Amino acid sequence: GAVVSQHPSWVICKSGTSVKIECRSLDFQATTMFWYRQFPKQSLMLMATSNEGSKATYEQGVEKDKFLINHASLTLSTLTVTSAHPEDSSFYICSARHRDRNSGRFWNEQFFGPGTRLTVL
Amino acid sequence: AQTVTQSQPEMSVQEAETVTLSCTYDTSENNYYLFWYKQPPSRQMILVIRQEAYKQQNATENRFSVNFQKAAKSFSLKISDSQLGDTAMYFCAFMKLNAGGTSYGKLTFGQGTILTVHP
């Protein structure tokens, strides 16, 4: 259980276009999802926290209009990189917080998706 | 705010030997979790081990164990009998808990340590 998928795994796009990345929790409710950005051989940088049915909370320095996050259901969050430029090329990882269906309690653990490699030409 | 520091950018070890990865953190919180995550070349983040701050006993998971020193704010990972599949980037992470023992879910990561296991 507690599997998180991301789609696509790899995307190449032209500068100026928009790209949407999906993050799905496959077998559990994910009321909270997190989006990270990672450069090669560096740590994960939290971009935003996505809560189902409400606006995402962005970390300082992350452009809200550039990185649009939507969390419309308990199993799906999307990150849209708008008007992508080469400097947006990176590895994007989502994670989800597991909520027990019976007790309603949150697990104090995040489950990570496999990541999406974005290359902007 | 919390900070997590991994002072070893790269480490290497021979297969079957033991290696210890260091992690220190800074927090004023008393209730929190600490994690070690592994990121192999596939880049999938994998939870290695978890430690609740209120537990004095060090967590263990098969070949992986931690040395948790709460007063010193130190949380090292020991890998015994290293295997080639242990080659990965390892991240130490901190999660603050609220008074009820749950969290807001945010993780603070260290810079990571690249571990290479040589045959």
Image: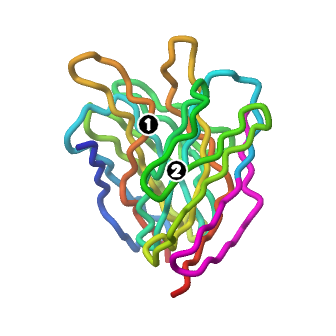
How far across and down, in percent of the image, does residue B102 sit?
A: 48, 20
To which chain does the residue with label 1 belong? Answer: A
Q: Which residue is drawn at 61% across and 38% down?
A: B94
Residue depth check, mark 1 versus mark 2: number of the one nearer the observer: 1
SS type, badge 2: strand
Q: Which residue corresponds to mark 1?
A: A109
Disc 2 residue crowd, few under 14, some 14–19, many 20+, Cα 10 Å: some
**Which residue is located at x 47 percent, y 54 percent?**
A82
- Residue A41 vs residue A20: left or right? right
User: Which residue was labeled with disc 2?
Assistant: A36
Report the Cα–Cα distance between label 1 and label 2.
Answer: 15 Å
The residue type indicated by label 2 comes to Tyr
Q: Residue B107's spot in the image, x, y percent?
A: 57, 39
Which residue ends up furthest to the top in the rendered image? B100
Q: Which chain carries label 2?
A: A
Q: Which of A86 and A50 is in front in this view?
A: A50
The residue range painted magenta reads B1-22
Marks 1 and 2, the one that precedes in the sequence? 2
| Kind of residue sitting beneath label 1 | Glu
Residue A120 pos. (x, y %): 49, 72
**Is residue B11 shown in magenta?**
yes
Check residue A98 for magenta coloring. Answer: no
On the same chain: label 1 and label 2? yes
- A100 w.r.t. A103: above or below: below
Name the element at disc 1. strand
- What colour-coding does the image apply? rainbow
